[in-house]
Image: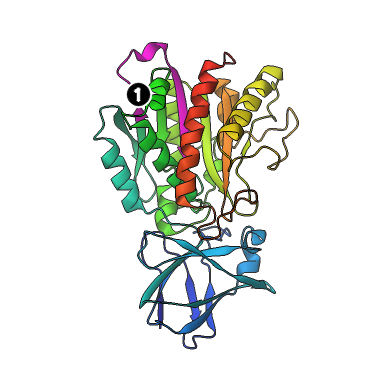
Amino acid sequence: MYISQNFDAGNIEVIACEDPSDIQLNIRADNKSEFYQWFYYRLTGAKQQPCTMKILNAEGAAYPGGFENYQVFYSYDRKEWRRHPTKLHKGVLSIDFESLYDCVYFAYFTPYSMERHADLIATSLQSSRCSHRLMGQTLDGQDLDLLKISSSSNDLNKKNCWIIARQHPGESMAQWWMEGCIERLLDENNLASKSLLEKCNLFLVPNMNPDGSRRGHLRTNAAGFNLNREWALPSLANSPEVFHVKQAMHETGVDFILDVHGDETLPYCFIAGAEGLANWDSNKQAQLDFYKKTLRDSNSDFQTEQGYPPKQPGQANLTMSTAQIAHIHDCLAMTLEMPFKDTTATPDEIYGWSAERSKKLAHSCLDTLSAYLDSGLL
């Protein structure tokens, strides 16, 4: 038997791999950080052999509650990812599994590789609706990509709407969401997308954290910085990703921003607003309520009852993207959260919350954006 992780987004440390009934593993922490939870590895040489893989340091993960009632993803072909039960006992996460083939992959969530990201950018640019800007490089020297998707009509009369994803690289569902968003926007046979692009320009950052994504990080960039705590004073030395994106936003202006994430613990899809801003008022609350309720009515996976408790006015954390951008640009700014586990009201026994459901939620979010732009609330 052998366990490997030296590939795009791979993360695991092997403690012992001689006894199939007691394979001992640890999740590697992000570089220069104590955050860890994301894992992705391959088991070989164990075909039709009952195995028990134990993640010994699960209790010390960033969100240990995320491993309660958790089902791991596994795949033989890295295309279809199914769920499999786990056991959590005294801080150790155990996976009992018998592989049908010589190789099987396991991951915290369906991975989204940087190779797939490159394919997404290249494929998108085949559309006349899409243009690209290289905003800069990351600390590891990777490109930071910005896509603009718009129709051929005059940009001057349109709103500038921004969507960013994967500030936290282990939240790979965020880039699956973005893939669904881009596919929908570039579908020239989709009348809803055509209508939306007549009202706004979409500026998309499909991956805010390429370095963390490739390194197999949960939450930080190459230097160990949590990008969603860098928006007040980003620097080229510590957080060039935020520095470049914030500068691009300054150049275009922002009339709307959605920041797409995943939550390790809560089994819901929900939105967190910027209620903590000092100038929060009834009009801003009406904008937020309209978007959330419209999205709830259009997609059964989304709900408005559970989520993060809103902050009181004046208590906003301005180091976070939505609070900072709402503060600067006075726009509707929201964080969309999707589960690593599954939704309690609409469970899927085979796949749980999945890449495909993330993509479908993106379609609903775009339709809701279109309704918001027509609402007269801006």
Q: Residue visible at 48% across and 72% down?
A: 13
Q: Is residue 164 magenta?
A: yes
Residue 232: name its quadrant: top right
Query: 180 and 325: which one is in front?
Result: 180
Instruction: Label 1, secondary structure: give it.
Output: loop
Mark yes or no: residue 157 visible.
yes
From this viewpoint, which residue is outermost toward the right? Answer: 312
Observer able to see residue 235:
no
Q: In this view, does 37 lie above or below 136?
A: below
87 or 90: nearer the eye?
87
- Residue 98 in percent (x, y) is at 47, 79
Q: Mark 1 points at which residue?
A: 150
- Disc 1 crowd rating (10 Å Cα; few below 14, some 14-19, many 20+) is many
Residue at left 45%, top 84%?
49
Residue at 56%, 16% in the rendered image:
375
Residue at x 30%, y 32% (from the top left corner): 132
Would you say 306 lies left or right of 93 here? right
Which of 230 and 128 lies nearest the eye of the viewer? 128
- Split into 4 quadrants, where in the image is the C terminus? top right
Q: How many labels, in total?
A: 1
Quadrant for the N terminus in the image = bottom left
- Residue 323 image position (x, y, % from top left): 61, 31
Q: Give the range drawn in magenta.
A: 148-165
Q: Nearer the viewer, residue 224 or 214?
A: 214
Q: What residue type is labelled 1?
A: Ser
How far across and how far down the image is residue 271, in percent?
Answer: 61, 37
